[in-house]
Amino acid sequence: MDKLRSQIARLETFENAKELVRKGQIATLEDQVTAGELAGLFLSIVGCVLGAVYFSRKITRRLKAAVRNARHLGRGEPLVFADSSGTNLMIWMQR
């Protein structure tokens, strides 16, 4: 009977050790997932900021051209439009 009790105790100890190892592995995996989520969040924020800067620069450039042409129009000077190749086109407005 004592031999049986010692074998059961060893099995319980082995099962407890296996459980502790599994918990440690799960904790490690949870840490890796959290690190991956944080990296993804950081990359998303950086991407959003870069996209906002890119589009705001395009809009700002167009607004500056519109203001410049409004001034030209007020002075009776030719309007200047830039096409997609960057070439400036001058258009004379007749009154």
Image (cartoon, rainbow, N blue to C red):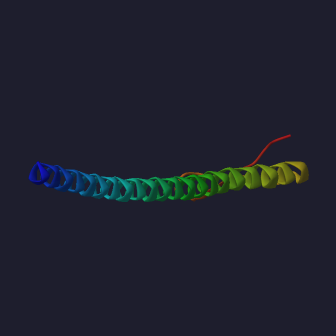
Q: Is residue 28 left or right of residue 72?
A: left
Q: How many marks?
A: 0
Q: Is residue 78 visible?
A: no
Q: Residue at the location (58% across, 59% down)?
A: 87
Q: In this view, does 55 lie to the left or right of 60?
A: left
Q: Which residue lies furthest to the right in this view?
A: 75
Q: Identify the image quadrant of residue 49.
A: bottom right
Of residues 90 and 59, the one nearer the viewer is 59
Give residue 5's position: percent from left, percent from top: 16, 50
Q: Quadrant of the C terminus?
A: top right
The answer to whether residue 50 is left or right of residue 35 is right
x%, y% of residue 11? 17, 52
Name the foreground residue: 28 vs 35.
Answer: 28
Q: Which residue lies furthest to the top in this view?
A: 95
Where's residue 66, x and y in %?
76, 49
Residue positioned 52% across, 53% down in the render: 41
What's the residue at 45%, 55% (across, down)? 34
Q: Nearer the viewer, residue 95 or 70?
A: 70
x, y percent for residue 28? 36, 59
Comparing 9 with 36, the one in front is 9
Asked whether the viewer can see residue 25, the reply is yes
